[in-house]
Amino acid sequence: MEDRIMTVHPEGKQGVNISRQKYDVMRQAILEALRVHGEMTFTDLAEDVRRNLESTFEGSINWYVTTVKLDLEARGEIMRIPKKTPQRLRLVGKA
């Protein structure tokens, strides 16, 4: 039986139950992109992750980026920069 994780949502909405392996791969790719580039737009983050995973990841990369990004926001690992358009993200604790 595949190990799964229930994601959480920063606005308290229902999370989704996804493969732990896919979650871990996506989490690592998102956090690494933000470590390397610092603050990023969501579009740039998704493109960076897609470029790094497209040859090895099975499934909709954009859907997983969105789902895991929301989970990481809810868990306090990354944050949206307030009052920025388009949406910008950074690691928590990075000014």
Image (tube, rainbow, N blue to C red):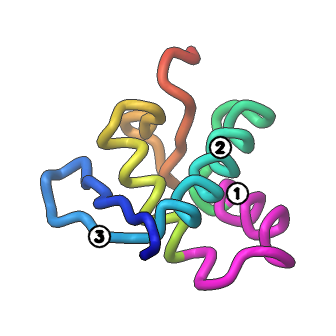
The quarter holding residue 72 reads top left
Q: Secondary structure at mark 3?
A: loop
Q: Secondary structure at mark 1?
A: helix
Question: Which residue range is magenta in the image?
Answer: 44-62
Q: Position of residue 94 (x, y in %)?
A: 57, 17
State the residue position of label 1. Answer: 44
Q: Which mark is residue 40?
A: 2
Residue that appears at 57% across and 56% down: 42
Residue 58, compared with residue 30, is above or below; it is below
Q: Nearer the viewer, residue 20 or 54?
A: 20
Q: Nearer the viewer, mark 1 or mark 3?
A: 3
Q: Nearer the viewer, residue 33 or 58?
A: 58
Q: Position of residue 67 (x, y in %)?
A: 42, 64
Q: Secondary structure at mark 2?
A: strand
State the residue position of label 3. Answer: 16
Q: Position of residue 6 (x, y in %)?
A: 29, 60
Tell me how far mark 1 sits from mark 3, CA to CA: 24 Å
Q: Is residue 61 magenta?
A: yes
Q: Nearer the viewer, residue 56 or 49?
A: 56
Query: In the rendered structure, are the residues bearing label 2 and label 1 in contact, judged by CB atoms less than 8 Å apart?
Result: yes
Name the residue type under label 3. Answer: Val
> In the current view of this chain or complex, which residue is farthest to the bottom?
59
Q: Callout 3: few (<14), some (14-19), or many (20+) C-alpha neighbours within 10 Å?
A: some
